[in-house]
Amino acid sequence: MINCVLSPSLLSANFVFLGHELGELEKAGVKWLHLDVMDGVFVPNITFGAPLIRSIRKACPLFFDVHLMIDRPDAYLEDFAAAGADLLTTHIEALTHPQRTLARIRELGIKAGISLNPGTGFERLKWLLPWVDLILIMGVNPGFSGQPFIAETVGKTRACRRFLTDEGYPDTPIEVDGGVSLLNIKTLIEAGADALVSGSAFFGSGDRALSYKKFNEIAEQARVNTDRGFERLKMWKRNQ
């Protein structure tokens, strides 16, 4: 049973053995792969772009959860969709016309996510919710993996879940990215998270299958204390 989606961040994988890493994730039963795209402008780091995603798409059947931490993302939506993204998340802080961006992502046949930095309130999304497939809440200031988790993220996640329910969108998934580990996933799920991104905490353990097993065990404990079945995310599949 998938109780909450774990989306391991490729940024923390061993790129020397990238093909092996992807194979290990698939064997472990992981369904999603988080791909952090950074440009050195919107965030103080540079990672990879559409060419790498296009390359691994040819050999990897996982659901590609692509997170654009870049300036002027509208110029690259088509590129990342064509490269194999299944979910494309952009930052509200980087968008001039967010409704147009979200609508365009959906027009490309993929899911549209919107991300919020730690200092950004989810109230900015009020009039965008009809076009939002997922809200990503940052648990750290974006740019580098391995940062400590910002504790206020739990309260923000809980408040965002209430906000979505009050606005008539109780089934819109919430994803949390940054500082996620086995120590806080239960609290985050109980607060309302449906998907969790884990980078250094997941890949640093060495044993991918064991990490995923432990995650699911804790997620099951958390699910007992919530009324959320994560049904919507269970239906999200890779675009063929």
Image (cartoon, rainbow, N blue to C red):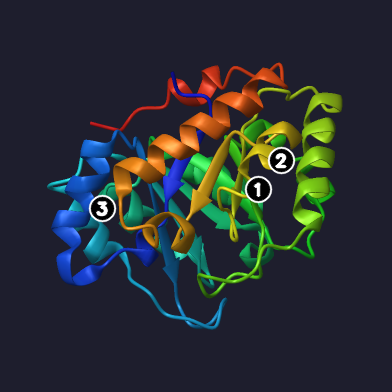
The amino acid type found where label 1 is placed reads Asn
- What residue appears at the point 42 percent right and 26 percent down from the top-left corner? 236
- Residue assigned mark 2: 187
Task: Give whichever of 28, 214 is nearer the camera.
Answer: 214
- Residue assigned mark 1: 184
Mark 3: few, some, or many residues within 10 Å (few <14, many ≥20)? some
Mark 2: few, some, or many residues within 10 Å (few <14, many ≥20)? some
Label 2 close to label 1 by CB (< 8 Å):
yes
Callout 3: SS:
helix
Q: Is residue 194 above or below residue 82?
A: above
State the CA–CA distance, disc 1 to disc 3.
33 Å
State the CA–CA distance, disc 2 to disc 3.
35 Å
Where residue 171 appears, as percent x and y from the top left, is 66, 23
Q: What number is the disc on residue 83?
A: 3
Label 1 close to label 3 by CB (< 8 Å):
no
Residue 58 is at least partly visible in this image: yes
- What residue appears at the point 79 percent right and 22 percent down from the top-left corner? 168
Q: Quadrant of the N terminus?
A: top left
- What residue appears at the point 54 percent right and 73 percent down from the top-left corner? 71
